[in-house]
Image: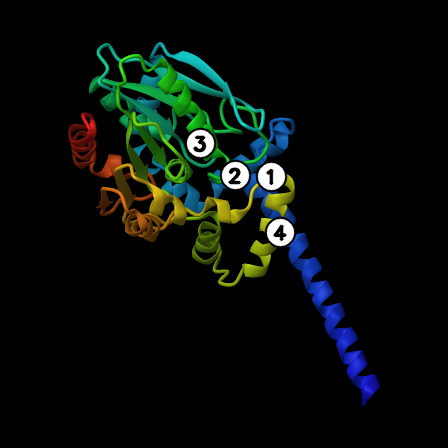
């Protein structure tokens, strides 16, 4: 009997070790696929980016799906502008890049924070011309690992929030007339903006705009696993992914959770989300809105997919932006 119990314990331990090995083996390529964007391995990086954007749900949620003409026109407008290159060094030593477009008679400055594996003149471009024509200086930042910015790992807002804080500091140093500053983020860029709000922002920051921002990296990965691939139980895999995030990318998944940031935030927030978004589910913005203790508004746009609210309802989108500026520019 004792021998049988001993054998059972040995078999159980062996099974657990084997299972742990399986999950670790699965977690490593998954971690690399979603976070690694190093420019030393250009072939691998560009290949991963291409594979990600070839996924069905990525394609159908991208603004180019159904709005390619407007998307390309907005991008072309940005590329034709005479913009200034700006650079800062991140807190972990990366050289980060942004484009700055001054207005003739600026009334405010807007920092534009693009989404996951995005670009300065990607989805952020659609409202850029409108904002610029309405007297806004624009700072198009390249998130770490993107555009002309250095970096190896995307951290889903954990480190990007500090990059945004450093860009705000630079903007404020140049802000001779103390113009109001707004932080406008989309998708992961929106999450980074919301995460930055828990830190001490200067008085010149008058508000935040968060379009389709997620609530946390962990919940986002759960939603993608269940919604795209019908995998409804990936907790053991996420434990290993979190371990790799900590060991190789220098952050923990819990650092991407917006809960505490929104509870601490005192800046007004304008939330947008498309009702038909299957990339970042609408409940993310609903939860972020609920958690936010500052002045806030949530605009849910029917029939809009991920980052498509400004395409589906452009007049409503513009109206809400102008209302935000009118209400808080002078605060």
Compare marks 2 and 1 and give the one earlier in the sequence.
2
Is the residue under label 2 in contact with that under label 4 (CB below 8 Å)? no
- Crowding near pointer 4: few (<14 within 10 Å), some, many (20+)? many
| Location of residue 241 in the rendering, given as x and y in whole percent from the top left corner | 59, 50
- Crowding near pointer 3: few (<14 within 10 Å), some, many (20+)? many
Which residue sits furthest right? 3
Image quadrant in which you'd find residue 245: top right
| Location of residue 71 in the rendering, given as x and y in whole percent from the top left corner | 32, 28
- Residue bearing the label numbered 2: 155
In depth, the one of 52 and 234 nearer the eye is: 234
- Residue bearing the label numbered 3: 118
Asked whether the viewer can see residue 66, the reply is no
Is the residue under label 3 in contact with that under label 1 (CB below 8 Å)? no
Depth-wise, is mark 1 or mark 3 nearer the camera? 1
Q: Secondary structure at mark 2?
A: loop
In the image, residue 226 sits, relative to residue 189, either above or below, namely below
Compare marks 4 and 3 and give the one earlier in the sequence.
4
Compare marks 4 and 2 and give the one earlier in the sequence.
4
- Residue bearing the label numbered 1: 249
Structural distance between the alpha carbons of marks 1 and 3: 19 Å
Image quadrant in which you'd find residue 248: top right
In the image, residue 77 sits, relative to residue 15, either above or below, namely above
Depth-wise, is mark 4 or mark 2 nearer the camera? 2
**What residue do we see at 35% from left, 25% from top?**
111
In the image, residue 169 sits, relative to residue 212, either above or below, namely above
Compare marks 1 and 3 and give the one earlier in the sequence.
3
- Residue bearing the label numbered 4: 27
| Location of residue 155 in the rendering, given as x and y in whole percent from the top left corner | 52, 39
């Amino acid at each position: 009997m004792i021998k049988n119990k001993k054998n059972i314990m040995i078999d159980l331990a062996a099974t657990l070790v084997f299972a742990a090995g399986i999950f670790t083996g699965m977690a490593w390529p998954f971690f690399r696929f979603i976070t690694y964007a190093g420019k030393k391995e250009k072939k691998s990086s560009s290949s991963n980016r291409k594979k990600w954007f070839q996924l069905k749900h990525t394609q159908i949620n991208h603004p180019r799906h159904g709005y390619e003409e407007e998307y390309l026109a907005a991008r072309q407008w940005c590329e034709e502008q005479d913009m200034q290159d700006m650079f800062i060094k991140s807190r972990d030593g990366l050289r980060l890049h942004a484009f700055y477009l001054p207005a003739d008679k600026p009334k405010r400055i807007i920092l534009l924070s693009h989404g996951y594996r995005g670009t300065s003149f990607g989805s952020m471009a659609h409202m850029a011309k409108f904002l610029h024509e309405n007297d806004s200086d624009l700072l198009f930042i390249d998130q770490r690992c993107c555009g002309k910015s250095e970096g190896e790992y995307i951290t889903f807002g954990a480190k990007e929030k500090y990059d945004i804080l450093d860009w705000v500091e630079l903007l404020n140093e140049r802000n001779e007339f103390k113009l109001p500053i707004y932080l406008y983020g989309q998708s992961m860029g929106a999450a980074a903006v919301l995460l930055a709000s828990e830190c001490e922002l200067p008085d010149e920051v008058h508000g935040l705009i968060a379009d389709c921002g997620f609530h946390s990296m962990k919940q986002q990965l759960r939603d993608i696993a269940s919604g795209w691939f019908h995998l409804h139980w990936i907790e053991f895999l996420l434990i290993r992914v979190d371990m790799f995030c900590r060991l190789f990318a220098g952050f923990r998944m819990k650092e991407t959770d917006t809960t505490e940031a929104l509870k601490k935030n005192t800046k007004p927030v304008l939330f947008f989300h498309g009702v038909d978004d299957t990339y970042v589910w609408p409940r993310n913005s609903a939860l972020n809105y609920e958690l936010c203790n500052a002045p806030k508004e949530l605009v849910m746009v029917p029939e809009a997919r991920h980052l498509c609210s400004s395409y589906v309802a452009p007049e409503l989108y513009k109206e809400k932006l102008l209302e935000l500026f009118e209400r808080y520019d002078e605060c």
